[in-house]
Image (spheres, rainbow, N blue to C red):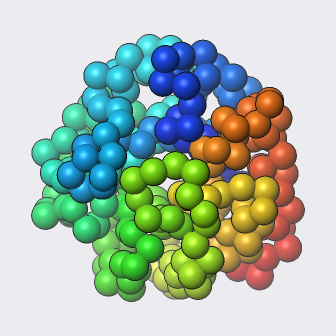
């Protein structure tokens, strides 16, 4: 699959979200929405009403990343609202298979997220239930953090697991993705890249997306996986 860029609006201007989403509509593949509840992570951001409002104005599909305490209750509602992808965290879900199936049944892609210190091997049997595996490359909760290189071997192991099962599962990396790190992520096996500060901190967010995608495509073409 060709690399995809999902700019995170966590780094956008919350007072003008629709306008900031429009800035990337010509080059980005997704709009990444970080939903945080101040329980699972120590930050409070956006929720279902904002997602519903954005869906009316976004030309891009929404990639909703639920960093919340009770994803089993809330995740299907994001899918039902029209999100293109909904990711729940393995560390928070009590009934992950049921919830992932509910997301798919509502018409969205189902994602499973894991924190930097969470081993990925324990979720190999769930690969058939998901469309995307999200690997956090920072500790979840805040934008603008430094990329954790320690996660790169896990990205490689995740890619090998997926290849071994011959499944069309995307590998997404989220946190600290920039011009300095995206090629290493692509070489390790990621194909969906969440970038917040690297996009919305640039003078031209759309051009920043284009450059990141070009870097990822170059690294992917040269990668052994």
Q: Nearer the viewer, residue 200 or 6?
A: 200
In terms of image quadrants, where is residue 107? top left
Give the vertical position of 87 relative to 32 (above or below): below
**Which image quarter holds the N terminus?**
bottom right
Along the horizontal axis of the image, is 149 left or right of 72? Answer: right
Give the vertical position of 153 relative to 57 (above or below): below
Residue 84 showing in the rendered view: no
Residue visible at 28% across and 29% down in the picture? 48
Residue 50 x, y percent position in the rendering: 35, 23
Q: Nearer the viewer, residue 33 or 124?
A: 33
In terms of image quadrants, where is residue 152? bottom right
Residue 214 x, y percent position in the rendering: 84, 51
Residue visible at 58% across and 51% down in the picture? 144
Total marks placed: 0
Residue 220 x, y percent position in the rendering: 78, 67
Along the horizontal axis of the image, is 49 left or right of 25? Answer: left
Along the horizontal axis of the image, is 175 left or right of 77? Answer: right
Q: Nearer the viewer, residue 215 or 83?
A: 215
Give the vertical position of 96 relative to 73 (above or below): below
Residue visible at 53% across and 16% down in the picture? 16
Along the horizontal axis of the image, is 62 left or right of 176? Answer: left
Residue 203 x, y percent position in the rendering: 80, 31
**Which image quarter holds the C terminus?**
bottom right
In terms of image quadrants, where is residue 218? bottom right
Give the vertical position of 206 relative to 217 (above or below): above
Residue visible at 28% across and 66% down in the picture? 90
Residue 224 showing in the rendered view: yes
């Amino acid at each position: 699959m060709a690399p995809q860029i999902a700019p995170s609006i966590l780094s956008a201007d919350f007072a003008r979200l629709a306008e900031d989403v429009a800035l990337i509509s010509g080059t980005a593949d997704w709009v990444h929405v970080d939903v945080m509840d101040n329980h699972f992570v120590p930050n409070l951001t956006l929720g279902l009403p904002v997602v519903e409002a954005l869906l009316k104005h976004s030309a891009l599909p929404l990639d909703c990343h639920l960093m919340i305490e009770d994803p089993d209750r809330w995740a299907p509602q994001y899918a039902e609202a029209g999100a293109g992808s909904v990711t729940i965290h393995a560390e928070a879900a009590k009934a992950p298979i049921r919830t992932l199936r509910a997301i798919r049944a509502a018409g969205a892609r189902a994602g499973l997220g894991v924190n930097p210190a969470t081993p990925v091997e324990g979720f190999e049997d769930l690969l058939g239930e998901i469309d995307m595996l999200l690997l956090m490359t920072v500790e979840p909760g805040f934008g603008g953090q430094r990329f954790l290189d320690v996660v790169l071997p896990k990205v490689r192991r995740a890619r090998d697991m997926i290849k071994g099962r011959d499944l069309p599962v995307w590998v997404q990396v989220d946190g600290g993705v920039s011009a300095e790190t995206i090629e290493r992520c692509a070489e390790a096996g990621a194909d969906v890249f969440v970038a917040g500060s690297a996009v919305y901190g640039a003078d031209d967010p759309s051009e920043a997306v284009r450059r990141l995608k070009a870097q990822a495509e170059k690294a992917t073409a040269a990668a052994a996986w």
